[in-house]
Amino acid sequence: MTFGHDPLHELSLTQNIVDLAIEYAAREKAVKVLSITLEIGALSGVVAEAVEFAFDVCSQGTLAEGANLEIRHINGRGRCLDCQTETEIETLTHLCPHCGSLALETVQGQEMKFTEMEID
Amino acid sequence: MCTECGCSSTDHSHHHEHESRTIRVEEDLLAKNNRLAAGNRQLFTSSHLLVLNLVSSPGSGKTSLLERTLADLKRRFNFSVLEGDQQTTNDADRIAATGVPVKQLNTGAGCHLDAHMVGHGVESFDLAETDILMIENVGNLVCPAAFDLGEDHKVTVLSVTEGEDKPLKYPQMFQASDLMLINKIDLLPYLNFDLEQCKAFARQINPRIEIMELSCQTGAGMQQWYDWLMAGVARKNPGLRGAGRE
């Protein structure tokens, strides 16, 4: 069994973005997608530049071609399982700044979300 | 701003030429995969199936670990295996040699299995008669982390011929996994692999991760892994119990 899949997971995700945009645009009887707003968390494992690059390819020949892609960066936040302190984290390998514990649980920053779009 | 259509026009006659407007979508980018994964999970649960998603770098010994596990446990449990690779049926051929039902999924250029492939992949299996479904993902510690397949647990296999800092380099995968199997421990005397450091790194990323050390070549540590599997089967299929069909 062979599937037509792609070399980077950002390409799969970006195909989902374009599919969603077309689906919503059709539902709203839009003729064009002007802009798309995404929220991508710092800890999501998604590279925003890779999404931007893939978007041009995936949107070609669709209502979303040429749409402006706005990517909002969501900071990472972790909560220490030992002392409960919440702290901003940019990677999954932070130590708790309060007690030095390694046991931080991610509470924010894993988002990959299509929040809204502007249509014509 | 016009509250009716959300445009920035101050002219409120709604006859401007392009009626651009903003609509809320609020959908997770993985929503489609997650929906399909939820469907798979429902099917697996109704079939009382324990499902594991085995992930690792290429060459960690996933297929060898499976071969040994199947050889040791296939009389006790009914297994089915999905083999994910970009190309070739080599791994499926190795599993087929054990007599266990197997299906090769070739992703082509793709770097991961997704819920859609797995949903179709299991169509040829008799799930009602299966106790454990093993899904061997494409050898890649990055992309498979994001794609739920409907499994009960992601199991990361890390071999001691790799660096002990793999959990720090690929944190998403170790965070998403419930169990880490450190394989090829028979090679430890010949390597500078710091086992304790590796475990500490993994727990730093995921404080809840379970860790087992084993060698599928010598069989060292395999019993602990089998006990874990049996406990998993007992949870999913209380009628069968961990002792299996023997």
Image (tube, grey):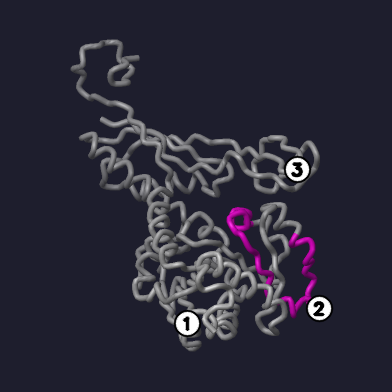
Residue at figure coordinates x 57%, y 71% from the top left: B58
The spot of residue A73 in percent (x, y) is: 53, 36
The spot of residue B172 in percent (x, y) is: 59, 53
Question: Quick check: B98 above or below B109?
Answer: below
The quarter of the picture where the N terminus of chain A appears is: bottom left
Can residue B138 be seen by looking at this rendering?
no
Question: Quick check: A13 above or below A71?
Answer: below
Which residue is the site of mark 1? B90
Chain bearing mark 2: B
Magenta-tinted stretch: B170-199
Q: Which mark is residue A82?
A: 3
Q: Per the image, is B110 magenta? A: no
Which amino acid lies under the numbered mark 1 shown in the image of this protein? Asn
Mark 1 to mark 3: distance in Å?
A: 47 Å
Question: Quick check: B223 above or below B27?
Answer: below
The spot of residue A118 in percent (x, y) is: 33, 30
Which amino acid lies under the numbered mark 3 shown in the image of this protein? Asp
The quarter of the picture where the C terminus of chain A appears is: top left
Relative side of B150 to A74, left or right: left
Q: Nearer the viewer, mark 3 or mark 2?
A: 3
Which residue is the site of mark 2? B189
Residue at figure coordinates x 72%, y 52% from the top left: B204
Residue at figure coordinates x 46%, y 55% from the top left: A9
The spot of residue B121 in percent (x, y) is: 38, 70
